[in-house]
Amino acid sequence: MKIVGVSACTVGIAHTYMAKSAMEEECKKRGFECKIEAQGGMGIEDELSQEDVDSADLVILTTDVGIEGEDRFEAKKAEGRFHKAGTADAISDAAAVIDAAIAAAGIDVSASAVAEKAAEPAKASAAPGGPKPAEKKSIFAEPGKTLLNAFNTGVSYFIPIVVIGGVFLAFSLASGTAGANGMEVTNPFMVSLNTIGMAGISMMIPVRAAHIAYSMAGKPALAPGFVLGYLVNNAVTTPNGSAVSTGFLGAMIMAVICGYFVRWMKTWKVNDTINTIMPILIIPILTSLVLGMAYIYILATPLGFVMDWLTAVLGSLQGGSAVVLGLVIGVMTAFDMGGPINKTASTFTMALMASSIYGPNGMFRVAVAVPPLACGIASLIARNKFDDADRQMGVSAIFMGCIGITEGAIPFAVKDLAHTLPGICIGSAVGAGLAAFQGIDCYVPHGGFIVALATSNVGLFCLDIVIGALVGAAILVAMKPKLEQK
């Protein structure tokens, strides 16, 4: 049997390659031919050719985001030989993912069938009662999965933009002096660096909106997604004369509407001449026109009210209420180590930054550094509970924690989730809770020690990360069994 597939996670760093490896290892155990394409942070690797796809018995996607070139698999979808799962599913139990795909396709992989295949190469036969050709789906089919993939895709594409903006702004602001309007940068070189950083921040919301729409409806949705993302990120004059900007909230809502609108337009029955210009002319222009006008004349005002209300409520949080928010953000940040829950917290804090509320971002930027630091510290100090491979991973995890990449904790969690998750969640909650209690603001959308100079209190920001990491490491060491006991 031949299995091909694609692996792609939200960030494109860890889960992508771990899922790919897990699928390939499981196929190797079963004697299956296997080729998995990785769509990670470095782009497409081990790319599948159309010949690979056509000759495969099964296509299995282990993805958390929309991928490039999914239309390659339309024939396999129609044959019922196509299966989707998440990267976490493949990492935790690749055998179950493959079994589910085989069962859904009705493929006979009994010992006799395998022997027969070895003697005379032929495609695996469909068992009686096997799959029926796929039916045409509604544009609103599986809305939960569609939206989750879309939001994760948006995060995947805009994270490099965030890193550019956040790191450059952090370095430029570090050279400034505190003034009435915040940090004032006067050094000419740092002013230029600040300009580059601000360009990245300005692109953040349009990039995310465009790729949410792209995930839902493909390439024709990309251009209107950029236009609508830019529109909501800048103040527009509504019919009542108010200037309204809805930032992250508006971008996410308009991107989803754009995705469904383009999906609907793609179902239009038109002649061949019109069909050739639909994706490059008609769909982008009509989508931008209709949805842009709908936003300005209908949606901008109510969305503006929602943003004002949210800003007022969160801006008034002090003392115990702020600490509770910090604890929740800390747990969300560590729970899936860069997955959808972590990205939900990130989106929430960056939406508030657009309204000049930087406290929740300070909580989140402390929390993102804690899990990998806690795992790294624990692996280095508890030598009777972690092996040499763990300690090597620990050094990498500490480095990733210092630059605010939560995914550095993933290898430890995959290896021993039960003993890892409580420690990193509590450690992150402690760090974020302390940041909330101290009222620490972070002015850039990135975390870890490298952005400390772009916070309202450099010393306390770093101290909170260290305390959270030490608490997490202590719990990890306490819960982890000794190697001989394990």
Image (spheres, helix red, strand yellow):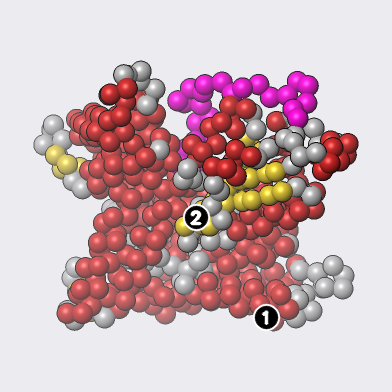
- Which dot marks residue 44? 2
Quick one: SS at disc 2? strand
Question: In the image, residue 297 lies at what x, y percent?
Answer: 19, 30
Give the position of the N terminus as an image quadrant. Answer: top right
Asked whether 90 or 402 is in front, the reply is 90
Residue named by callout 1: 380
> Which image quarter is the C terminus in?
bottom right
Q: Nearer the viewer, mark 2 or mark 1?
A: 2
Q: Nearer the viewer, residue 127 or 170?
A: 127
Neighbours of disc 1 within 10 Å: few (<14), some (14-19), many (20+): many
Query: Mark 2 or 1 closer to N-term?
Result: 2
Residue lying at 64% horizontally and 51% vertically, measured from the top left: 35
Residue 286 placement: quadrant: top left
The residue located at (57%, 42%) in the rendering is 51
Range shown magenta: 125-150
Q: Amino acid at mark 2?
A: Ile
- Give the CA separation, mark 2 to mark 1: 35 Å
| Res. 176 image quadrant | bottom left
Q: Is residue 339 magenta?
A: no
| Residue under the point 60% across and 33% down | 76
